[in-house]
Image (spheres, helix red, strand yellow):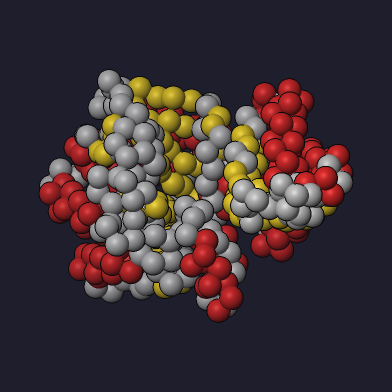
């Protein structure tokens, strides 16, 4: 079946999702659309629901290998985006809406052609919530209620066992910026990140009458920012370290020396080992800044996502398909960027790839982001993905696959958070 034949239907679904953006663990309209589409295409389909809005379904069950095509349901909080929801501030300037539409295009193709029957692996489709690490107040509430255990949708699904029968994870993702040629990207590694929270504690006094006996918490935080700036010289360029300290809470007023300032920053690195090392450097800068001005500092570490190291062996199938494809002109290979995603967490447990694709203009997560080449996104690119999946058929070296347990994953997270 030609993807051109179903193009109009898939395009309408993409537009509907784009016009109804939803934040993580709140993607109720989107997941209902997904479920209705799957049932309309394949009434006998078995759906596994998880994590409030997640959906999982498989074609060709019972085979010894299982490859998951994973699509992310959620939007970003971007109230100034031109297609933002005026009530929630959600906007699909991440491109996730195209992932969902592409996954549905693939699903319909395989059901109607029955081509999945010729594959030597089960093909599982997983529509997963909450990839974006945001709206944390709401997610804190879900954590307190016991509804979830992790902010990110993939770690939560990992905990629930959604990936227990999956051997390989395959994702796609938008590449930001405009391209003269239709382009894909392979082997692009992502940074991991954590959050550091430093509460500087001093002593408040009247700023005019008695500043002499005060201990200025704001001055400690200022000294901390200076120390971070100077410490950048000690941080490895190869790790693409990123930090962005901001004042999160304060009790400042003009006539009282502040005695409590909370500073928060993310910390991004390309490896978990260096993440631990850089976290110690930040902690030392915070402690030294507090001590220098006779104050104290409380340190809290909050884990974000693990770095994502793509599986190069699996990406060779993508390269082969590209070399035989006449409609996609260019390929990027081997970049590393400081953006992050919870695909990094999943890749700790099983081998994963994420294929980048053009078709957009503007900046990822920016106010100007939009798709500009829907024919590529919903016709040519899904067809290309079937070629990749065909290349994998019967050719995956299972001795090179790996599986780590969720317990090992939790142990790794604890080793990172325990740096303080």
Nearer to the camera, 104 or 368: 368
Name the residue furthest front. Answer: 209
Residue at coordinates 62% horizontally, 48% vertically from top-left? Answer: 254
Relative horizontal placement of residue 388, taking residue 359 as reference (left or right) = right
Front-most of residues 281 and 95: 281
Image quarter of residue 289: top right
Image spot of residue 304 (x, y percent): 61, 52
Instruction: Give the residue drawn at x 20%, y 51%.
Output: 15
Whole-percent x and y of residue 2?
17, 44
Left or right of 212: which side holds 47?
left
Nearer-the-camera pick, 63 or 343 = 343
The residue located at (54%, 43%) in the rendering is: 340
| Residue 377 appears in the picture as rendered | yes
Can you give x and y, in whole percent of width and height, for residue 376 in the image?
24, 35
* Residue 281 sits in quarter: top right
Residue 310 against residue 302 in the figure, above or below: above
Q: Position of residue 270 (x, y in %)?
A: 64, 36
Q: How many tags in the picture?
A: 0
Residue at 67% x, 62% y: name it.
Answer: 406
Judge left or right: residue 193 versus residue 58.
right
- Is residue 349 visible from the viewing direction of this image? no
């Amino acid at each position: 079946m030609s993807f051109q034949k179903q193009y109009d239907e898939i395009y309408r679904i993409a537009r509907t999702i784009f016009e109804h953006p939803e934040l993580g663990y709140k993607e109720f309209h989107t997941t209902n659309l997904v479920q209705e589409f799957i049932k309309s295409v394949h009434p006998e389909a078995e759906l596994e629901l998880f994590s409030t809005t997640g959906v999982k379904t498989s074609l060709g069950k019972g085979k010894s290998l299982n490859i998951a095509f994973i699509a992310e349901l959620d939007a970003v909080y971007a109230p100034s985006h031109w297609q933002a929801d005026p009530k929630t501030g959600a906007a699909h300037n991440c491109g996730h809406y195209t992932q969902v539409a592409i996954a549905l295009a693939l699903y319909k193709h395989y059901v109607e052609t029955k081509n999945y029957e010729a594959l030597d692996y089960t093909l599982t489709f997983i529509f997963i919530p909450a990839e974006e690490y945001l709206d944390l107040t709401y997610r804190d509430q879900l954590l307190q209620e016991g509804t979830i255990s992790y902010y990110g949708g993939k770690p939560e699904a990992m905990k629930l066992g959604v990936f227990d029968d999956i051997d390989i994870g395959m994702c796609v993702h938008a590449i930001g910026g405009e391209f003269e040629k239709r382009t894909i990207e392979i082997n692009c590694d992502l940074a991991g990140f954590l959050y550091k929270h430093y509460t500087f504690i001093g002593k408040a006094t009247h700023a005019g009458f008695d500043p002499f006996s005060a201990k200025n918490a704001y001055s400690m935080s200022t000294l901390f920012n200076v120390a971070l700036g100077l410490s950048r010289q000690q941080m490895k360029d190869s790790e693409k370290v990123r930090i962005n300290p901001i004042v999160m809470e304060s009790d400042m007023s003009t006539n009282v020396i502040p005695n409590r300032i909370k500073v928060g920053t993310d910390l991004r690195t390309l490896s978990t080992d260096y993440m631990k090392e850089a976290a110690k450097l930040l902690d030392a800068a915070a402690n030294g800044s507090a001590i220098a001005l006779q104050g104290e500092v409380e340190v809290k570490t909050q884990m974000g996502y693990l770095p994502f190291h793509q599986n190069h062996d699996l990406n060779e199938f993508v390269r082969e398909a590209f070399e035989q494809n006449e409609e996609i002109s260019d390929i990027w290979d081997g970049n590393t960027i400081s953006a992050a995603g919870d695909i990094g967490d999943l890749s700790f447990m099983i081998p994963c790839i994420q294929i980048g694709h053009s078709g957009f203009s503007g900046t990822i997560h920016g106010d100007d982001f939009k798709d500009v080449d829907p024919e590529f996104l919903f016709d040519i690119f899904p067809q290309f993905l079937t070629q990749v999946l065909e290349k994998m058929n019967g050719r995956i070296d299972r001795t090179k696959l790996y599986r780590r347990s969720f317990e090992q994953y939790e142990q790794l997270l604890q080793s990172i958070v325990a740096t303080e």
